[in-house]
Amino acid sequence: MSEGRKGILASFDYLDSAVESIEKLRAEGFDEITAFAPFPEHHIEHALGYRTSPVRLFTLVGGLTGAATGFAFTTFTSMDWPLVTGGKPIVSIPAYTVIAFELTILFGVLATVIGVFWNMRVPDLKSNVIYDPQLSAGRFGVYVTASAGRLGAARDILEANDPALVEEDAEGRSHG
Amino acid sequence: MATATKPDEKARERGALTHPDVESMGEVNVDILRMLSRPGKGWWILFGMSVAGIGLLFFAWGNQLVNGIGLTGLNTPVGWGVYIATFVFWVGIAHSGTLISAVLFLFRARWRQSIYRAAEAMTVFAVMTAGLFPLIHLGRAWHAYWLFPYPNERLLWPNFRSPLVWDVFAVSTYFTVSSLFFLLGLVPDLAAARDQAKPGTLRHKFYTLTSFGWRGTDRQWHHFGKAYLYLAALATPLVLSVHSVVSWDFAMSIVPGWHATIFAPYFVAGAIFSGVAMVITLMVPIRKIFGLEKYLTTKHFDALAKLCLVTGLVVFYAYLVEFFMAWYSGEDPERRVFWNRVFGHYWWATWIMLICNGMIPMLLWLKRVRYSIAALFVISIFINIGMWFERFVIVVTSLSHEFIPFAWNTYRPSLTEMSIVIGSFAWFSFWFLLFIRLMPPVAIAEIKEVLPPPMRRKTEKEGAR
């Protein structure tokens, strides 16, 4: 982000404190907010205004690729060396459906996993943006970056909800 | 800090259904991550036993590789013996893990949360165990790669019309998918383990690496939740397909006793039945040793027992249908195979199967039995035994009694075969024991999902919903 930005992290013991802070920050025009939760929390997603995740496209494309590969590969290999076995046609669609089905699932899952890792911005082993280890236990966190001048306003909003911990990040890096 | 007020009544009710004794979210981390601490003497004894068992497995297998498949009892007409029976047994065990993690997830069954992690681990390790048996059974295990399609100078490809090739695709897909599903679900919990480890220690480094730097941000949870849903939706048809394909290894042939259209649903039900029984067998000692009564309540076991009862009834129905169809078909070889099953050379195996899978699980109709952990443990072990014998009965009795009386013969597993079968249990335990010490065996994040969220105000604000 641009120079002179700073970040501030507040972690709360209560879910509603975090949700309220997010709503207030958004109302005040702070838009670079990262929220932390120890489990998938829909109130937070709602407060941040989330819509659909692009992961589903990965799943769909992966699955369709798998189905196409399954049929194309079995057909190609049978035509490559045509050999009648069991009196069945060279291209035995019902039998190949089993292979195509399994590859649909396999490719769909592989693509979903690639998609989710890509979208979650992991692996990210080196991240040293401030973080509170309690966030994976029971606390809910709100991290916001703002220009140095507006940081005070953000701090006031966060502190109004009794955070258990407040920390500042001098460089205002983003959590991605 | 504001004083904590009681969570609102509605939310409290929500948590009370699954884990009434868990007070706070932090408590979950403490209780579950405690399991990852230094193992006690009992663990080392079990671990030593499984290492010894693996030694037996590889000694017997190595011996068989050097001296040939003649060390087994396999011969004409029984060319498939306990190796294939045990392969089917372990693939079956795997199935309930995916059922609990994926199917019950889609059905929003909340009791699954505290069980699914261990069940999923069981799936992965059971498939790893099952995967050994085709290699062992091949005899010339170094040619196993011939099963996979790869370009070669002879321009040969596998025969995709063969159910055995379907099986290669089904089982390897199943292994890949269940491992990925398992590992993805672990990421947030490994991050929790990382956060409580001392920075700089080996433990901290291990969990940092395996949690991929997960922070639990809104973006991460958002995509994670969606991906989890799609994976569950893909794993659900997969789990049904895998054991169907395994059943077609048999049903696609014309051997009397195998050639039946009921095989696919019969095998799938049997797989889930045996797998749920194995989950009970594994969860009872884990609950006892680690004191997880708060997380694995009798209600959880009641739900597992009901699942066992339902699938057990389907399996028993399938047994009866098989006998009926053999009689009703009017086919002499078919009738004789089934007569031979119950009253012939292998009558004892068939009766073990019928009693352990058909009759003993009927006790689960009683609520008192379903709520007694000890009774469930004993019944689950009977089911495990019965389900192994079911596969033995299907594989061996059918082959030993094919069409021409001249070709009938009996089969007896050799010492090599039995050592490998016993060794496979050690191989499975080895991985499972490592798992419960290295990874959180109960899903931390997912339990929190069903706990009442900590709220500062008495009632949730409408706008925050």
Image (cartoon, coloured by chain):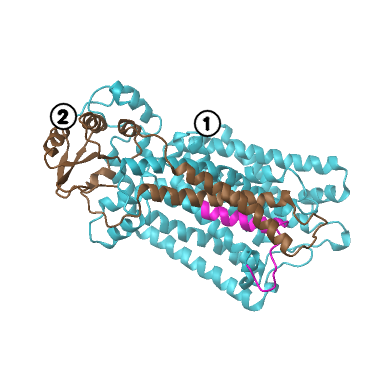
Q: Which residues are magenta?
A: B151-177
Q: Chain of mark 1?
A: B
Q: Position of residue B186 (x, y in %)?
A: 40, 49
Residue most extreme to the front: A2
The answer to whether marks 1 and 2 sit on the same chain is: yes
Hue used for the chain lettered B = cyan
Viewer-proximal residue, B271 or A77?
A77
Task: Give the amino acid at mark 2.
Answer: Ala
Q: Position of residue A138 (x, y in %)?
A: 27, 40
B245 horizontally vs B49: left or right:
right
Q: Amino acid at mark 1?
A: Lys
Q: Secondary structure at mark 2?
A: loop
Q: Which residue is mark 1?
A: B367
The verdict on residue B370 being magenta is no
- Which label sits on residue B2? 2
Residue A42, by quadrant, is top left
